[in-house]
Amino acid sequence: MGSRGIVVLTAVFASLSWMAPRGLAAGASRSPSASVLAPSSSSTSTSSSTSTSTAAPVAAVGGVTPLSGGDGWLVWSAPSSSGWVLMGLHDGVTVRLPAPPRPAPFDASVGADAQGAPVAVFSRCERTPTMALPDGESQSGGTLLQPETGSSCRIRMLALQGGGETAVPIPAPRGASDTTPSIWHGQITFARRAPGHGDVWQIMSWSPSAPRRLETLSHGRIPSCPEEPHGCTETEHGQVEALARDGQLVTFVWAVEGQGVIGEGAWEVRVDRTSGSRSALAEGGFGHEACTGANTGLEYIWPEPPIAAGSQALFPELYGYDCFHGYASMLGSHGVAGGHAALGKLSTVALAVADDDGQLYGLVPQTLLGAGDIPGCSSSAPCEIEPLATPPMRRVVRPPFAPFP
């Protein structure tokens, strides 16, 4: 898939006049109090208070990794001499979890098994797919899975309070590949590339109470080319790059290419009921090739892995402005009803965000090396995993950007 982003259209963000592009500028060190997006005093907040934390950073990480939190645990990947290892934080103690390394960061998600015990689920593959940064570029690690680069993946489970890694007995036809799992009380939702569906990934749900049966959930949209008399004539491609489930809600990043799609590629953040009764587009965008010049204000938005939190999906996003001279992070929320989103500014740039029972954590870069450098993490310039304050969320009534008709 191509690079991800959205060239921001004035009409789309006309309702976001309270944003002011002040944030982490190229060549500057991060300040904990860096203000990125400044709300006006007339904005209406959906929350009268915000949570704060003065805790020290959890860990330093020499590569970009997804984060996942829940049930008192925070889980991430860290590069090592033998590959990427799985790390965990519980009760203030950081440990390396007993899972063999992977060539790329784990697509791990924290949840509870059927007995309510905390577990992490992830994929193991004959060919491990790579991860990419929000803009699609490769660095050390990444946050969005590129499932087309892997094959023969199966879902594994790791008990977080003792016990080893075990295979989950999910039935799979020959040639299937399963990635981006998320678990809720033993029920696992995941993405599958399966024979018979071409290059369109399916979203499946499995339960230990009916281990031989799979449910197929709704995936993201595929263009239908209504302007063409015979519909689309080119092969479509749609894949899940991140996924999370909580209760009856599933949210995911859907990347799509094909005839009728704007730009080099497109993405959606979707919020669905697992029953299939409701489905909402929370955000969308399309690929780009280059910025349009300095001093242009807000110019790009890149998705990050979303979080399922009860009846709402939280979707962090990385904003770029002034031709990659500055960056900002926003946190959105959206339910399964379309048309209403809430947005809040994070206090610092975060490449990934996790939520553990209401406490946010972010993967925070410490410096930008120069103009045009996208934020990242490396062994020489590690990121820190830090507790983040939950921002005030301000309701914005606007249709999400649809990357194709």
Image: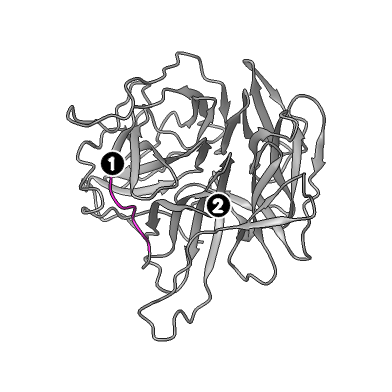
Q: Residue at x 26, y 33 (%)?
A: 22
Q: Earlier in the sequence, mark 2 or mark 1?
A: 2
On screen, 44 above or below 32? below
Helix, strand or loop at disc 2?
strand
Magenta: main secondary structure equals: loop
Tell me, yes or no, whether the highlighted magenta stretch contains residue 399.
Answer: yes
Range of the magenta residues?
A: 397-403
Q: Which mark is residue 396?
A: 1
Q: Residue at x 68, y 45 (%)?
A: 188
- Direction top: furthest residue: 54
Q: Position of residue 74 (x, y in %)?
A: 61, 27
- Between marks 2 and 1 in the image, the one whose residue lies nearer the viewer: 1
Q: Quadrant of residue 394?
A: top left
Q: Position of residue 198 (x, y in %)?
A: 62, 71
Q: Residue at x 39, y 39 (%)?
A: 332
- Residue 371 seen in render: no
Q: Nearer the viewer, residue 181 or 142?
A: 181
Labels 2 & 1 near each other (Cβ < 8 A): no
Task: Identify the residue position indicated by label 2 in the image.
Answer: 241
User: Horizontal placement of 321 versus 40: left or right?
Assistant: right
Q: On the rendered image, what quadrant is the C terminus found in?
A: bottom left
